[in-house]
Image (tube, coloured by chain):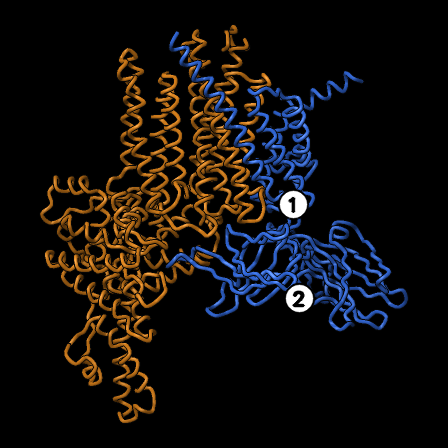
Chain colours: A orange, B blue
Amino acid sequence: MKRRFTILTACAMCAAAVCAFAQHPPLPAEAPPARWDRETLELFGALPVQDGGRIKPMATLAAFKLLNLRGMRSWRGPERPGDNRRERMLAGMTHPELAPVEWLMDTLFYPRAAASYPVFLVHSDEVAEAIGVPHQGKKKRDRYSYLELLPGRTKLFQLADQYAARSGGELTGLQRQITHLAHNVADYESLLSFFDFARETYPTRATEGLRLIFTEEDQTRYSDVLRRAPLLASVIHTLNTAEGGELSAEKREAELAALRDLLGRVDRFGSSAKGIALLPPLSNGSSEQWVSPGDVVAEAFMAEEPPEAHLALAESLETLAASVDDRSAFKERLRGVHGELVGRAAERGEYRRVPLEMSFYRYQLIGRSLTLFILCFVLVALTWLKPGWRRLTAAAPYALLVPTALLAAGITMRCIIRGRPPVTTLYETILFTTAVCVALAIAIELMNRRRIAVSLGAVLGVAGMFIANRYELKEGVDTMPSLVAVLDTNFWLSSHVTTIVMGYGAALLAAAIGHVYILGRVLRVRKNDDEVYAGIYRMTYGVMAFGLLFSVVGTVLGGIWANESWGRFWGWDPKENGALMIVLWMLILFHARRGGYIQGLGFNMGAVVCGMVVAFSWWGVNLLGVGLHSYGFTSGIFRVLVGFYVLETLVVLLGCFVWLRDHGYLAPAESTP
Amino acid sequence: MKDLLRNLYRFLSSYGLSCVLFFLLFLLTLMGTLEQIHLGLFDVQKKYFESVFLIHELFGVLPIPLPGAYLVMSALAVNLFLGGIVRARKGPAHWGVLLGHIGIVVLLLGAGIQYRYSESGNLTLYEGEQSSEFESYYEWELAIADASGDGSFTEHIIPGRQFMHAGARTFRSPALPFEVCVERAFRNSLPQPVKPGDTPAGPVVDGFTLVSLPPDKQAERNAAGVYVTIRPASGEATEAILWGVSPVPLTVEMDGKPWVIDLRKERFQLPFAVALDKFTHEMHPGTQMPRKFESDVRKVENGIEQSVTISMNAPLRHRGYTLYQASWGPPDAGPGEPLFSVFAVVNNPADQFPLYACIIISVGLCVHFARSLVLYLREQSEGAAS
């Protein structure tokens, strides 16, 4: 129902702007504008905006809008006048964090050109077929421009509206894709039409009354009309009452019609300028809500005093939009708007984290750590290929420290930006778990120098960062969202969540070591060297012990938190059960080992199963869609999870094979460590 | 005999039993988690976690008998006590493990006390309202009162567990001039008018019949209903339908006095009253995401008032009772319209046991694994030296 509302509202909001496209299709697509210079992009990217309940740089907003639409964070964009291949390459490579800003600026300031950019990722041509969009020459999964989708727009919204009445679970994959595309199109339209209020003019010479109100101009601007809102309201009131009786009925009707036309125009273009909240609240109010230029209409007509600060900002945006073709004047005016917005945000104490967030995305610590983890993996592979190269072997764990430090720095920057502990979202659990895995692996390597831990550290680092990247692409939303009320507690977030995620990390590392043990035994690597396998077994045991400590403490802390906020220690909620299952499985392994029921092979097989239990607790329960931990629900990972379980089951079966072989069921028995 | 006892002791304190019990609990937890997709949490809890035995239908078709978590955890407590504390080695090398086991015993003890002795429910207050009663989420009761007084009255309560899951039962009291016979009870039901030509499954009372509905996945949404017969010592009996969601109780005339009979959620008395002065809810600016729920309340006890703010993660604790911010409404209230706040109320004598257990377990495991790590490092360095 809510989704239905959102779509309908979005459609209504954008209706006026879309008329420009819908009434005159097919529009001659404008050529892409000249490339924006770097300073302009930086200034625009650094504008503070309120989105998702927090203040963030425009660059972040642009990046996640583009990610959601196009399925990619960055995009070099179309070829532009004067571009050459090298410049395009450089534009994409030297400041990749600005690529989405460039796209957003094109969309806002050159909507006719941007409408032909292929930014809509359509996952299947069945979607295009269903909404009646020609898809000849397109791949099955391809990107479409707004103009390409325009012929199917009406059908798209009709279908999305039908599906909105059903719950997510009842929709087929195709229907979900159609709904998602409709959301994206509505969102995109709100950007295309955002500056229409500034591009449009408002005629004021239609009647004598209007000429008296707008004394000097033939045409006026949005902000000028809103400045005169009290006067306009009073005139309308007068014309509608007996006081307007001095005028003939015909004249009065003509004046009213002209006023209705003018205000209707203001309302229409105001409605299409609500996509970005970039005006800080007025200083005389207690509201924390930033507003868009479209919201100023209501302020101007409803408030007792004219919202002068917002009117001035709207005027600045009008002059900015008007100077778009004169890039040096545009930059100068953008500098003015930037200074004004930053100044107001800073006054309210809301700007201090914006530059840090810009830096976070500029340095790309998380992305770069993936590259370095891959390099470390290559380095570690060399140590296996050339075991005699001792310096390389000695350097490997220190080399692995570099991407780990980058990752840790990225996590720390996120903590500072959000004013929160390191783990508050599913995305952050991936980052933190990876950091824990790799840090533990480095610590183990420094203790025993077997090259196994450092190798696994590199593999897990690459895997973790790859999953984080894929998850970010799949979700396509800001990874630093505002938190729901129950999570608004730094004490419990830093104690329970951090602890439990450390347990995940240790259990996954133990599972990885278990793989090495089993595969080594299957392939009979160093089959006569019992000491090697005993060493690996001790690693698994040690890491599992670390995991048990954090899993038990984390689970109990979670219960105490639940007692603090929901009034019960344990409620058998799926997420709680997942944590309990990890603890129980670890306890089974430790007690079975202590009782002599399992040894090296059994313990390592158990560790692999523990990895599967962690996957269930971490991701599996989120797919169930039930329970109190609704802020952690996710979807679309079922197939990945099933693939993981199949692979892990195969590894466990290989372990069974080794056991059968060791016990003489398949071949003559061999000694077992 | 002695051998038998020794063997029993060894069995009950064995690692093997620990492993089997942990595995059973693991299985039950997994099944209980997956089952929540189809059954509500309340029913899953009853079936898997508060039961002695159960039948799990594998893939919905293959029945598998299993011990319930109640039985498994009881056996685990015995195993833990005998194996992890009594039989365990007590030297300094084992203090960590011993402490860890003691911590788990404290945790299980807390869970047992909570299961047996805690009361829980909710208290809903509109701004300006005051109450010293809270009601259960799931349990029902029949309340009978003489309505002829001057406003003060004594209620006679029949707890729901005495009639909800039994057949027809008759209740008598010397204080009542009539007996109440609960003929049939439904956990979730809906009264429906009977039209000419209908063939209702149950009795028809005043043109209505009670239709049994499948239990709701959210058990607190179930609307119980009962058929009752009120029989005076002499005179004609009155048949009636009582429905838990009905805003008006049944009124009957007996011995010349009006009596009200109400089927309602079980109520508990607080040793103090709570008045809601103001409820505040905030969204993150520009979103529909809740940022803060907060209730400004007054705790009233023996005429003394104390102002307290209850919010998420900051409950009110007083005289063994804890009031948590749980919910609010109405969700569609406009500006200036009165709001209500819902508090979860819990009286759990073992409220802080998990905290004590957490501290003991943390210390125990830290001691044990730190010792193991030191030994390992020493061994490594000796190995390297040799």
Regarding residue A212, the answer to whether it shows in the image is: yes
Residue shown at 44% from the left, 30% from the top:
A644
Instruction: Judge whether A584 appears above or below B175 on screen.
Output: above
Q: Amino acid at mark 2?
A: Pro
Q: Secondary structure at mark 2?
A: loop
Q: Which mark is residue A309?
A: none
Residue pointed to by mark 2: B247
Q: Chain of mark 1?
A: B
Regarding residue A649, the answer to whether it shows in the image is: no
Give x and y (percent) for residue A642: 46, 33
- Name the front one of labels 1 and 2: 1
Q: Chain of mark 2?
A: B
Instruction: Judge whether A159 appears above or below A411 on screen.
Output: below
Residue pointed to by mark 1: B349
- Please identify the quarter of the rendering in which residue B3 is found: top right
- Please identify the quarter of the rendering in which residue A137 is found: top left
Q: Secondary structure at mark 1?
A: loop
